[in-house]
Structures are given as structure tokens and as C-alpha cells.
Image: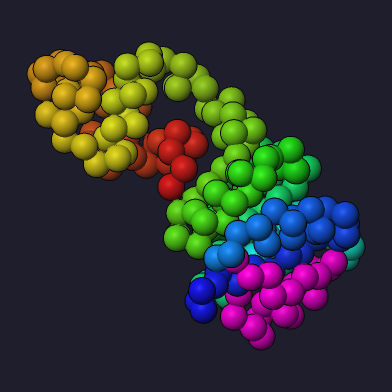
Amino acid sequence: MNNKITIFLAEDHKLLRDAWKLTIEDNTIFSIIGEAETGAEALDYCSKNKVDVIIMDINLKDGSSIEVIKKMIDTIPKAKIVVVSMLNVYSIIKDLYKAGISSFLTKNSSKEELIEAINKAYNNEKYYSLEITQLLLERDNETINTLNSRELKVIQYICEGLSNKEIGSSMKMSEKTIEGYKTKIFKKLKVFNNLGIYSFAQKNGLINS
């Protein structure tokens, strides 16, 4: 395959970089084109070379890379960033989410999650590991906890773009029943349309993209 997804690794622990490489190089569609141990080195390389996906730790040899990540988002918008870190601090995650990172994993994430995060990022989708998603949900669970399982399922289908009729068919309910669920959801989330539901779901980690 000629047009491989190019990947750059920014991590100051060689053992972890080598583990990432073993996982990534098992996939023939990926090509690791460089690596760095500092944020400055990563920024310099990625600014001068075409990189599709940057896998980056928050803390590197030259300190916190949060500002470097934000600068990359501004100056290298075509490169998608997957953050992998031991840090699962809510304020940091929300800050980077708002800045526009593509994916956020912890170092407890599986190999499968790493590959999925890379693919999602490359395709302009967001991906947050289960651990990160749970953390985000915990911080806004007052509203989420008012939703029952069927309402959460309706939200999921709405975010997938299904019509009331299609949702009813999937859930084996009438279209009128689905309309009733949506009315309750609008009231609970304090929104007025499907776009408001989608915005809430995206903000609170109920969907990955």
C-alpha cells in the first residue's frame, strides 16, 4: 500500500514507545515516520514533515506538553493528535477536548483501543477510551442520571441520524412512543431539537464523534 497513514510518536519512555511501535507496525496501513522525547522536538519535526497522526504523552522530558499540543492544533491542523497519558484529570481532558484533540487514551488502554483511536483520528472522528469517557460522565451525571436506559438508547439513535420511525422499528415501539420519549428527553436536557441532543451527547461523552 503506497498511501500509508503516517504516524509520529512523542513519548519520553523508550519502553513504552517500543510497545506502541510493536502494536502499530502490526498494521500494514500504518507507517511510523519519526519519534521524539520532548515536546519541542515533536513540534519541530511535525511542523516540517507531513504527519497524519501524532501520538503524544502529556508529560515529556521538557515538561508538560499541553501548550505544545495546543500549538500543534493551531499550526498543524491537518495532523490529528491522540493523547496517551497516565493523567486522567478532568480539567486537563476538558481543556484539551475544547482545544480540539482527536482522541484521549490512558496508558491502561488496550492495544485495540490504540488502533481504534488512530483510525478514528485519521478519519476526523473523536475517540475517548472507556476510562476517560467514564470520568467525563461522572462530572455531569446529575443530568445523565435522570435518563433511563430507553431514553439513552433513543439519544444514541438520534445521534446516528435515525428518524422517529427508524428508531421505533429498532426498539420495537411505535413512532408515537418514540415521540413521547423525545419530548421527555428535550425537557430533561433543556434542549429544543435533535441538534441540542447531539450537542449534549457529544459534550458528555455519550458518543465518540
Q: Is residue 34 located in the magenta-colored stretch of the structure? A: yes
Q: Is residue 60 left or right of residue 117?
A: right
Q: Which of 43 and 109 is in front in this view?
A: 109
Q: Name the residue at the bottom extreme.
A: 48
Which of the 4 quarters of the picture holds residue 28?
A: bottom right
Tell me: residue 15, above or below residue 109.
below
Say above or below: 33 vs 83: below
Q: How is this picture coloured?
A: rainbow
Q: Give the range drawn in magenta.
A: 30-52
Q: What residue appears at the point 16 percent right and 16 percent down from the top-left corner?
A: 173
Picture coordinates of residue 170, whole percent (x, y): 22, 25
Query: How many numbered callouts?
Result: 0
Q: Assess whether residue 75 is covered by the magenta stretch.
A: no
The structure residue drawn at horizontal position 51% and vertical position 79%, both measured from the top left corner, is 2
Q: Is residue 160 visible?
A: yes
Task: For residue 59, say whether it is visible.
Answer: no
Q: Residue at x 88, y 54 (%)?
A: 15
| Residue at position x 50%, y 19% in the image | 142
Does residue 117 appear left or right of residue 188 in this picture?
right
Left or right: residue 11 compared with residue 135 = right
User: Can you say whether 181 is above or below 130 in the image?
Assistant: above
Relative image position of residue 177 (x, y in whole percent): 15, 16
